[in-house]
Amino acid sequence: MNDKYPKRLLVKIKKYFEAERKRLILRIKQLDESDPYKDPDHANDNADIGLDVREEITHQEAKANISQVQKRLAETDEVLDRIEKGTYGFCKKCKKMIDTDRLSTNPLATMCINCIKK
C-alpha cells in the first residue's frame, strides 16, 4: 500500500463522520420513539380500524426508516474504522490511493474509478 492518506484531510473527514455518527444515533432513537407500537398502552386501546391501520403504517415506516439509518450508521462506522487502521482513501481492490476529488464527492468510496470500471 502507498503512504498514508494526507493527515490534514483525514482530520476533517474524521470529524465529519464522528458528528454524522452522533446524528445518526440520535435519529434512530427519534424514529424508534415515534413508533406507535413502542407505546405501552398501544395494545390496550380499543381504537377503530382506521386508527389501527394508521398505526400499522406508521410502525412500518418507522421500521423502514430505522433500517436505512442503521445502514448509513454501519457505513459511517466502517469509514471511521478505516481511518483508524490507516486504510481510508485506498482502494479495497488494488490498494492504490483513491483520487481526492472522488473522495470529496463521495467520502464513502471504497474503490478507485479504475477498479469500478473493470
Image (cartoon, rainbow, N blue to C red):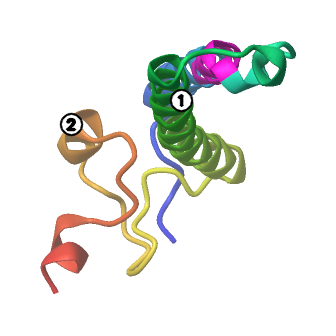
Q: Amino acid at mark 2?
A: Thr
Look at the image and tell me whether residue 39 can be seen: no
Q: Nearer the viewer, residue 70 or 91?
A: 70
Q: Is residue 19 above or below residue 107?
A: above
Q: Residue 118 appears at what percent x and percent y? A: 16, 87
53 with respect to 38 (left or right): left
58 with respect to 111 (left or right): right
Residue at the spot x=70%, y=14% of the render?
A: 33
Q: Amino acid at mark 1?
A: Ala
Q: Is residue 71 above or below residue 63?
A: below
29 with respect to 60 (left or right): right
Q: Is 43 inside the magenta-drawn segment?
A: no
Residue at the extreme left of the image, as rendered: 117
Residue on which disc 1 sits: 62
Magenta-colored segment: predominant secondary structure: helix
Look at the image and tell me whether residue 85 can be seen: yes
Q: Is residue 49 above or below residue 72?
A: above
Q: Residue 17 appears at what percent x and percent y? A: 54, 26
Mark 2 is surrounded, within 10 Å at the Cα level, by few (under 14), some (14 to 19) or many (20 or more) other residues, namely few
Per the image, label 2 sits on a secondary structure element best described as helix
Q: Nearer the viewer, residue 3 or 87?
A: 87
Q: Is 31 inside the magenta-drawn segment?
A: yes
The region drawn magenta spans 24-36
Q: Nearer the viewer, residue 55 or 88?
A: 55
Q: Earlier in the sequence, mark 1 or mark 2?
A: 1
Tell me the number on the disc at residue 105: 2
Residue at the spot x=44%, y=21% of the render?
A: 50
